[in-house]
Amino acid sequence: MGMTMTQKILAAHAGLDHVEAGQLIMAKLDIVMANDITGPMALPIFRQMADKVFDKDKVVLVPDHFTPNKDIKSAENSKAIREFAKDQGLSWYFEQGKSGVEHAILPEAGVVTAGECIIGADSHTCTYGALGAFSTGVGTTDISTGMATGELWFKVPSAIKFVLKGEPSEFVSGKDIIIHIIGKIGVDGALYKSMEFTGEGVSHLSMDDRFTIANMAIEAGAKNGIFPVDEQTKAYLAEHCKKEYHVYEADEDAVYEDVIEIDLSEVRPTVAFPHLPGNAKTIDEVEAMEPIKIDQVVIGSCTNGRMSDLRKAAAILKGHTVHPDVRVMVVPATQKIYKQCIAEGLLDIFVDAGCAVNTPSCGPCMGGHMGVMAAGEKCVSTTNRNFVGRMGHVDSLIYLASPEVAAASAIAGCIANPEKVGGDR
Amino acid sequence: MKALGHVFKYGDNVDTDVIIPARYLNSFDPQELASHAMVDIDPEFAGKVQPGDIIVARKNFGCGSSREHAPLCLKTAGVSCVIADTFARIFYRNAINIGLPIIECPEAAEGIDAGDQVEIDFDSGRIYNRTKGTEFQGQAFPPFMQELISAGGLVNYINSKKNK
């Protein structure tokens, strides 16, 4: 019986020729990552097992959630991981000013690559599946164990194969595709499973689109999302990563629990309504409703704060002004992206339109800081979760959307169709 | 090992943001976290929960973030077990790793109501609803996970292997 792409990576890291779904294995870890929420909590647990990390090149710490430190407790937490990184001589510690949102900075800085087995104490660690790695989110005890021992137990997942066909239309990007898919299978539609994306449609997706799609695999309950390694992946890795990588491919006779075809040319700009990422409505359905007036727009995050996301938002915002009743926060995901926005004149476009441009941080996405919402407020956000109270008050509402929809909505003051606003593309 | 307590009942997709909102995650002090447990879905929970009480919910309990603060705040608040149709996978791992018993049992999740007094035998997986006089059979953990649980969580398990 053949193996899926994920199963092949896991087998190789467990030192086994073959694994099958449901099997419990011990796998070697290539990267173990934590942030300023999960990292400080991991340190006392780590110290119960070891004095030194298993490999200073493979343990990564990224302060990004409550940074720049939002209060004294957050400052203490950041300090704890900063000192730990120094004491342990970690090669990869990303300080403010040289950093960014973890799932954007790790691929950009070449920390993660194809074929690796990666864990992160953050649920959106599944993002690196875009590079053809097995990558999954875990909790604090797991990450502490990974830091100490360099290995972790996994239950080998079964998989759903998504066969992507065709080319997405002009105002449709990775975000619309993944919200469409979660809308189709539900927020537990891939529970405990891998989502393997294949098909000729993959070639029409940029690396940024793939990061966005893999990033939200967790929102369908998946253990991981994964893309094949193609010429685009190789070009990305050549530009960003010095490490050697390994290309794994699913066996032709791999067993899948389900095979779902997605015609990318039929996907419409799609919005996830409160309070689940699977509450998908096409922009056409939204336009048929009473206008949904909004108070805030957030463009950024590990889902949609990359260069192509900000270019798309800027193309729509250029020459427009933000609706007087709306606050807009643009959050470039890394310092490099921030600088590139300056170089390309995007910051001028955002600021001239009336947007606030924040420093890279997870801040508003989880109601941490720099964009928390009051009772009754509504936000169109390019982030990944619209749970009750996620971005602030328990009575605030979040609509998840692409950068294009978010930018169009910022101008209109209500959820809007980017196809109608157009833009300088 | 047994548990006995009254039930708090919730629906599908109880996410980690309502179990313990991010605004409290600048701390990982278990007592402080416990004082905010379930606040965005059930503001009265933290004040009412008694040691031994049981949470029963439906599909995909604990979906969302990887924050181990979620099972930790429930355990510290006194919750002796969470029963659900299914659990989100990171919550599932975290719960086992910190020693919060969880049981997947759709029949029990359907047949138990808020306020019922429920008794659980973890060795057999038997769930007995004292209030209604009904009984359910929960799924037993695979042997490896039983080993983890009986060692008292992942850290003790790793350390015990090291000392051998």
Image: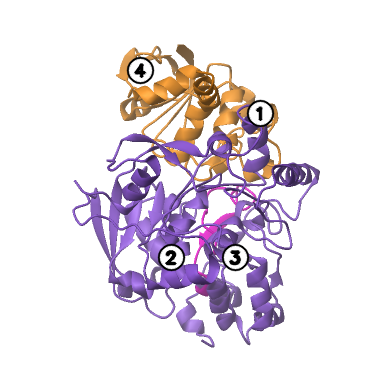
Chain colours: A purple, B orange
Residue contact between numbered discs 2 and 3, judged by CB atoms under 8 Å: no
Q: Chain of mark 4?
A: B
* Mark 1 to mark 4 CA distance (whole Å): 28 Å
On whether disc 2 and disc 3 are found on a single subunit, the reply is yes
Name the residue tied to disc 1: B30
Tell me which segment is drawn in magenta.
A382-404
Q: Main secondary structure of the magenta part?
A: loop
On whether disc 3 and disc 4 are found on a single subunit, the reply is no
Instruction: Compare marks 1 and 4 and give the one earlier in the sequence.
Output: 1
Residue A289 shows up from this direction: no
Name the residue tied to disc 4: B125
Q: Is residue A191 or residue B145 the one in the foreground?
A: B145
Residue B151 to residue B96: above or below:
above
Q: Chain of mark 3?
A: A
| Mark 4 residue element | loop
Q: Which mark is residue A210?
A: 2
Q: Position of residue A169 (x, y in %)?
A: 37, 79
Residue contact between numbered discs 3 and 4, judged by CB atoms under 8 Å: no
* Mark 3 to mark 4 CA distance (whole Å): 45 Å
Q: Which mark is residue B105?
A: none
Name the residue tied to disc 3: A300
Q: Amino acid at mark 3?
A: Gly
* Mark 2 to mark 3 CA distance (whole Å): 16 Å
Residue under the point 60% across and 35% down: B69
| Mark 1 residue element | helix
